[in-house]
Amino acid sequence: MVDLISITKEEPFHEFTHNEDSVKPFWCLLTDGGPDENPRFLANISKYLLLFKKLDLDYLTVRTHAPGQSTYNPVERNIASLSGKLASIELDAFAHGKHLGSINGKVTIVDEDLGHRNFRHAGERLCELWGRDKINGHPVITTYVEEHNRSDFLDIEEELWDWIDRHAQICKYSLDIRKCKDQNYCSQPRAPEIYNILSANNGFLPPITKGCDGHFLNLVHTLEYFGKKLPGYDEYCPSISQDQYPSFVCQKCFRYYSTKMFLKLHIKMTHSNEKAPKSGVTNEKTESLPRDYGCNVENTKDNEISNHEIRNVQVFQEEKPVKKGKSRPHQQNLTAKPWEQDHLTFKI
């Protein structure tokens, strides 16, 4: 996050980060799905929230490629040339002297200051090599950073799960954060036109939808043409079967969560004082109504949860197999799938 903030301060990047003199209100980040960037981890979500609030964004969407598809990531493909430049090049690890020694028969660092200077020499040499050539006509700007300056986020308060639940939609391969209508939480949107378009889906981009030809549809076209008849989030995710899908959906407000731990947090914070709904088949019309999850949640002392508890949540715990007869059948109108009509299918 510190690197992204520093990019907004660099003049050569203003073409991508700014509109006139202000930071663009709508950001889309592509990540490789690694543990330090994966938008499914709660620790990473908290960091993306800091970026969202620091830049006063109207909308932030973080997208990652599914397993085996990271080779199609344009960022990964572009930076591959940086590795090629290091072929047959040797970096002197002891330019200022040897900082390694033997203590009790083990090789270890005996002079940390000398080690930092040697590392800085190698880092500056890499910056010099990588900054010589352009990538796809764009300059490569490299800077050796001795230590990240985190003072940019000192004025930003980290949020609890309640804030995350109000403003974020978490899926298997994406994270979407948007401003809500409550001015006690968020400032006025800087791009009201985009805000109004997304209001058709509670302020979020629509779920990934597959057409009848197997192609995934353009999100804007999906939102424009299908409106309230959209499928559920991650409904087309191959790792979630139709039998498993209801176990990730809140049975009180019908909101989807990518993990059962997130679903438990949502129920604890939002519905702990509510009575359980009557058993029976859910009204299909009720499911299709837009729901504003960000403005109607009441906080009580009994529902509070600490930052420490949230950070120690194990998100990727192994899911138990769904027993037959225990889960509800997936409520879905099999005859109403407008995104599978040939004349409304968009290829991207």
Image (spheres, grey):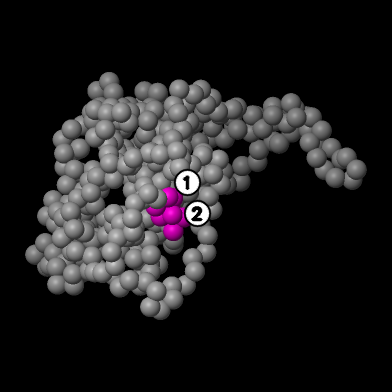
Residue at point 29% right, 60% down? 277
Residue at point 16% right, 67% down? 337
> Is-magenta flag for residue 340?
no
Residue at point 29% right, 54% down? 253
Dots 1, 2 in contact, CB < 8 A = yes
**SS class, disc 2:** loop
In this view of the protein, which residue sits in the foreground, 52 or 130? Answer: 52
Q: Quadrant of the C terminus?
A: bottom left
Which image quadrant for residue 292? Answer: top left
Which image quadrant for residue 217? Answer: bottom left
Up the image or down, 194 lies above or below 225; here it is above
Up the image or down, 140 lies above or below 229; here it is above
Residue 219 screen position, x and y as percent: 22, 52
Residue with the most extreme left position: 343
Secondary structure mostly seen in magenta is helix
Q: Residues within 10 Å of mark 2 (few under 14, many from 20)?
A: some
* Label whose residue precedes the other's in the sequence (1 or 2): 1
Residue span colored magenta: 260-268
Residue 207 screen position, x and y as percent: 27, 55
Residue with the most extreme top position: 21
In this view of the protein, which residue sits in the foreground, 112 or 22? Answer: 22
Residue at point 50% right, 36% down? 130
In this view of the protein, which residue sits in the foreground, 180 or 82? Answer: 180
Disc 1 to disc 2, how far (Cα)?
A: 7 Å
Residue at the disc numbered 1: 42
Mark 2 is on which residue type?
Answer: Val
Residue 329 screen position, x and y as percent: 30, 73
Any part of residue 320 in sight: yes
Residue at the disc numbered 2: 315
Mark 1 is on which residue type?
Answer: Leu
